[in-house]
Image (cartoon, grey):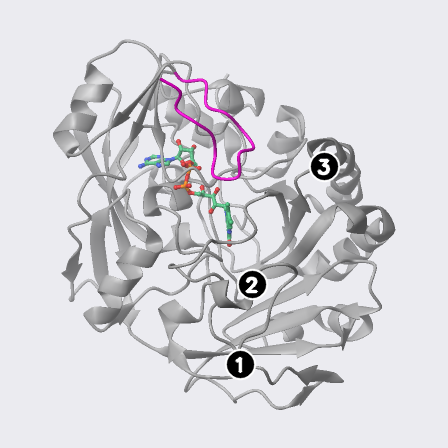
């Protein structure tokens, strides 16, 4: 029986079987019941063969979420297959919140943290940075618990499925809060490049959307946390706020997007770009993303703009976000405050394959790292040169899984396993 493809249809899975576990015991049986390759599959929102296996895939999305809050520790523990959006609705009903969300709430917690998924905000770490504990099934089929502070923990959180199958994840939480979203049009490139940290810091979470070849930045989305700093004004550095309560983005219908127009609302209905009850994004697309130091942002953006006329015909839109530095070995923001340069491409694989090496060459002087879940052309040598703790992460994966049963072609191609 065919296992199907990634959410965007960009990779058809070649694994021989998919086990849809309903309990932790079924995950243990799935791992212990074979000597061959086995690997976790989340909600399939990665764009490559990253999640694939030469043997068996196991998904934990069918295990009940059973969220539990530890108020004293300010943490929630939840089934790893739970979608962020579903966890968020439950947390809000209990008066709690997460520090941030990715652009879509449909992704599983286990799969998102395994690839270093992020939102935006100069002070907001990636979603993985909120992981305080992991419960996983190891290569022997045993249930192992590990927590922040344990030796090697920082090498497991952004773990690419290379050490086991996470079944429960513990995340930091905080009391619920309100956010408003304001969309500005006409922000000049000079203003953005002149003081990028200030522009990206002008709100709890700021995203800039561009087609690269335009005279001004198409849209700037400022997500302001109510009670933190000043509310946005009608004009901002020459840009004008959009008054319609629901602004569209490229060809995404406004009804699929979270509410804008400065209307305050709970964090979970403003921090993601896409609504949980709608089709996220376009669906017929390929995504690529690179991480550079925020301090290098203006030069890195100028280098990509040089390619703007060639990029634009193949692009749906690019998004620029920030991620605060963290200590997670395989995080795109490891050790540096980061600018994330994202491309949502039209679904033309040949054009993307031709353009990514050129973008990578333009960004190479800035030590750009690729997003683990998205399409890129970087070689193992290139990835190693920009991932300071790759050898440490690989050594830990080798120690936990000497036979490489959790490895796959993708990890071997990138030197995450040998
Ligand atoms: C429309 C769209 C919007 C996106 N927006 C963002 C964004 O805003 N920010 C961002 O950073 N990324 C974004 N992404 C990328 C996405 O967040 C990542 O690809 C993420 O890994 C998806 O999670 P998933 O559950 O679908 O994982 P999958 O694609 O199913 O798997 C990804 C990896 O996680 C591993 N994995 C999955 N579940 C587990 C588990 N239980 N235990 C151990 N390992 C596991 C898999 O083995 C694989 O290596 C977006 C993707 C799409 C399609």
Q: CA distance from mark 3 to mark 1?
A: 34 Å
Magenta region includes residue 3: yes
Earlier residue among tags 3 and 2: 2
Q: At which x and y percent is residue 35?
A: 27, 9
User: Count of labels shown?
Assistant: 3
Mark closer to the observer (3, 1): 1
Magenta residues? 1-15
187 shown above or below 139: below
Of helix, strand and loop, which one carries label 2?
loop
Q: Is residue 64 above or below residue 25?
A: below
Image-quarter location of ligand 1: top left
Q: Secondary structure at mark 1?
A: loop
Assign the magenta stretch its main secondary structure: loop
Which residue, given by chain and number where applicable, does mark 1 sit on? 245
Name the residue: 40% across, 40% down: 114
Residue receiving disc 2: 253
Image x and y of residue 245, in percent: 53, 81
| Magenta stretch encompasses residue 122 | no
Q: Residues within 10 Å of mark 2 (few under 14, many from 20)?
A: some
Which residue is the site of mark 3?
352
Q: Secondary structure at mark 3?
A: helix
Within 10 Å of disc 1 (Cα), the crowding (few <14, some 14-19, many 20+) is some
């Amino acid at each position: 029986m065919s296992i199907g493809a990634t959410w965007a249809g960009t990779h058809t899975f070649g694994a021989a079987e998919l086990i849809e576990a309903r309990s932790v015991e079924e995950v243990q049986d799935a791992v212990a019941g074979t000597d061959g390759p086995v690997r976790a599959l989340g909600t399939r929102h990665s764009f490559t063969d990253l999640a694939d296996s030469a043997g068996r895939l196991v998904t934990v999305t069918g295990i009940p979420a059973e969220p539990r809050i530890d108020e004293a520790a300010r943490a929630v523990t939840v089934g790893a297959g739970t979608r962020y959006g579903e966890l968020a609705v439950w947390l809000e009903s209990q008066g709690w919140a997460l520090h941030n969300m990715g652009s879509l709430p449909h992704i599983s917690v286990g799969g998102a943290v395994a690839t270093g998924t992020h939102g935006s905000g100069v002070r907001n770490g990636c979603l993985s940075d909120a992981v305080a504990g992991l419960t996983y099934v190891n290569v022997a089929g045993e249930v192992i618990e590990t927590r922040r502070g344990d030796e090697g923990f920082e090498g497991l959180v952004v773990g690419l499925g290379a050490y086991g199958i996470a079944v429960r994840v513990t995340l930091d939480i905080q009391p619920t809060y309100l956010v408003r979203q304001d969309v500005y049009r006409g922000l000049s490139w000079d203003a953005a490049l002149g003081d990028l940290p200030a522009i990206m810091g002008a709100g709890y979470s700021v995203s800039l959307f561009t087609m690269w070849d335009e005279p001004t930045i198409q849209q700037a989305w400022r997500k302001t946390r109510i009670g933190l700093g000043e509310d946005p004004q009608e004009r901002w550095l020459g840009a004008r706020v959009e008054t319609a309560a629901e602004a569209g983005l490229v060809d995404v219908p406004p009804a699929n997007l979270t509410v804008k127009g400065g209307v305050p609302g709970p964090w979970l209905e403003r921090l993601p770009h896409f609504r949980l009850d709608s089709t996220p994004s376009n669906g017929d697309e390929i995504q690529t993303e690179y991480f550079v130091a925020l301090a290098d942002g203006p030069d890195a953006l100028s280098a990509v703009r040089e390619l703007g006329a060639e990029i634009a015909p193949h692009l749906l839109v690019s998004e620029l976000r920030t991620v605060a530095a963290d200590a997670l070995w395989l995080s795109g923001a490891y050790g540096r405050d980061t600018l994330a340069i994202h491309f949502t491409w039209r679904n033309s694989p040949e054009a993307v394959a031709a353009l990514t090496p050129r973008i990578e060459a333009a960004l190479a002087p800035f030590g750009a790292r690729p997003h683990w879940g998205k399409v890129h052309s970087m070689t193992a040598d290139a990835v190693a040169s920009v991932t300071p703790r790759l050898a440490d992460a690989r050594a830990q994966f080798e120690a936990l899984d000497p036979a490489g049963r959790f490895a796959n072609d993708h990890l071997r191609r990138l030197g995450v396993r040998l």
